[in-house]
Amino acid sequence: QVQLVESGGGLVQAGGSLRLSCAASGSIFSINAMGWYRQAPGKQRELVAAITGGGITNYADSVKGRFTISRDNAKNTVYLQMNSLKPEDTAVYYCKEWGERDDYWGQGTQVTVSS
């Protein structure tokens, strides 16, 4: 059974940084694409960043130059380094794994950026 567990969320002032982690278990992590989504109150869930098994990355325009997604296949973990945070980055951040047959989601971690 695939399980994704996020950590690293919290409260930070605008301009600050946070690093989110997502630890995966039960899947062939090294070959699956991984991603981070976020959902703010009253808004749809949106893709923030994604990384393939080979390390190719993709970012939403709103976070380019500020966020960096990376993965450590030896630790079955994907990271999201978030710098220069803005109040509009406030949301619940979810980890996603694109499996061979199914997609999997973590439980989410709250990120709150105060102005």
Image: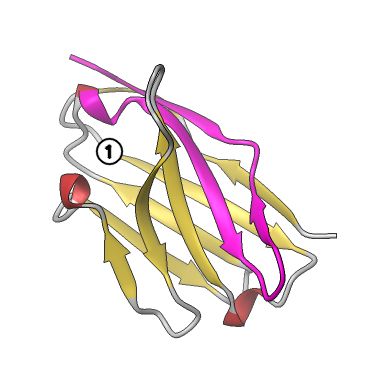
Residue drawn at 45 percent across, 76 percent down: 52
Q: Residues within 10 Å of mark 1 (few under 14, many from 20)?
A: some
Who is closer to the viewer here, 20 or 38? 38
The quarter holding residue 114 reads: top left
Who is closer to the viewer here, 105 or 42? 42
**Residue 68: in magenta span:** no
| 88 sits to left or right of 30 | left
User: Residue 34: horizontal and vertical position, in percent?
Assistant: 51, 64
Residue drawn at 29 percent across, 58 percent down: 68
| 70 sits to left or right of 72 | left
Q: Main secondary structure of the magenta part?
A: strand
User: Residue 47: horizontal and vertical position, in percent?
Assistant: 38, 49
User: Residue 89: horizontal and vertical position, in percent?
Assistant: 28, 31
Position above or below: 6 against 89: below
User: Residue 25: horizontal and vertical position, in percent?
Assistant: 75, 62
Element assignment for label 1: loop
Residue lying furthest top: 115
Position above or below: 18 against 43: below
Per the image, the residue denoted by label 1 is 17
Tell me which amino acid carries mark 1: Ser
The quarter holding residue 18 reads: top left
Residue drawn at 29 percent across, 66 percent down: 58
The quadrant the C terminus occupies is top left
| 89 sits to left or right of 108 | left
**Residue 108: in magenta span:** yes
Magenta segment range? 88-115
